[in-house]
Amino acid sequence: MPDLGTTHPDRERTRRILEERAAVLARPLRAEESADTVELVVLALGPERYGVEAQRVREVLPLADLAPVPGAPSVWRGIVNVRGTLYPVLDLRRYLSLPDREHADRPEKVVLVLGVDLTIAIAVDDVPEIRRLPAAAIGPALAGLCESAGESVQGVTDDLLTVLDVEALLADPILVVREEPT
């Protein structure tokens, strides 16, 4: 008959394993952490980096078959056809008053961005990453932004990633295309 006053090595091992499993299961799920976390799609325009909330990005595609629209404001590059749907293409570089592309030979991309009432394509040089960071890591916008971009900027991170506010961007009166009477 076993001695009940001593600990059996297998029981002790089993208890440790169960305690470790319980500790792992007790940790919060990632979904619970997301309230304090922002996931951003990083858009590259030359050396500049801009972030857009990942939930606003529908897809990223190579820029192809761009059709110019005569009479549209200069911030609009034209329209693209994506699987039978036409999207206006915003030249984010012009909108933000950045210099022209240095490497015009490199292919551009478009990022389909969802607003409340509108989906547009934004022309960018590249989409290098998706970044997850604490919401508190987004500080106030830097002084000296061009006037049109100032309202569209939500804030800036410590490593100078400028976070764009998609709704404010799409509500900017500069982007409105007015039909002129003939």
Image (tube, rainbow, N blue to C red):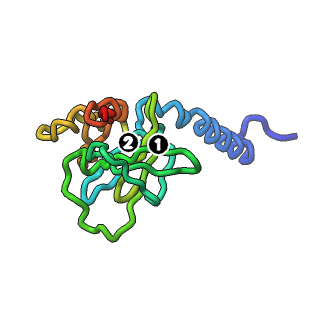
Residue 45 or residue 70, whichever sits in front: 70
Question: Quick check: 65 above or below 31?
Answer: below
Q: Is residue 175 left or right of residue 37?
A: left
Q: Which residue is mark 1?
A: 57
**Which image quadrant for residue 171?**
top left
Residue 54 or residue 105, whichever sits in front: 105
Figure disc tally: 2
Residue 98 x %, y %: 20, 52
Residue 15 x %, y %: 68, 39
Q: Residue at x 43, y 33 (%)?
A: 115
- Secondary structure found at label 1: strand
- In which quadrant is the N terminus drawn? top right
Residue 178 or residue 20, whichever sits in front: 178
How packed mark 1 is, by other alpha carbons closer than 10 Å (few <14, some 14-19, many 20 or more), is: some
On residue 21, which mark appears? none
On residue 52, which mark appears? 2
Residue type, mark 1 in image: Val
Q: Residue at x 62, y 36 (%)?
A: 25
Question: Quick check: 22 above or below 122?
Answer: above
Residue 84 x %, y %: 58, 48
How packed mark 2 is, by other alpha carbons closer than 10 Å (few <14, some 14-19, many 20 or more), is: many
Answer whether labels 1 and 2 touch (C-beta < 8 Å). yes
**Which image quadrant for residue 180?**
top left
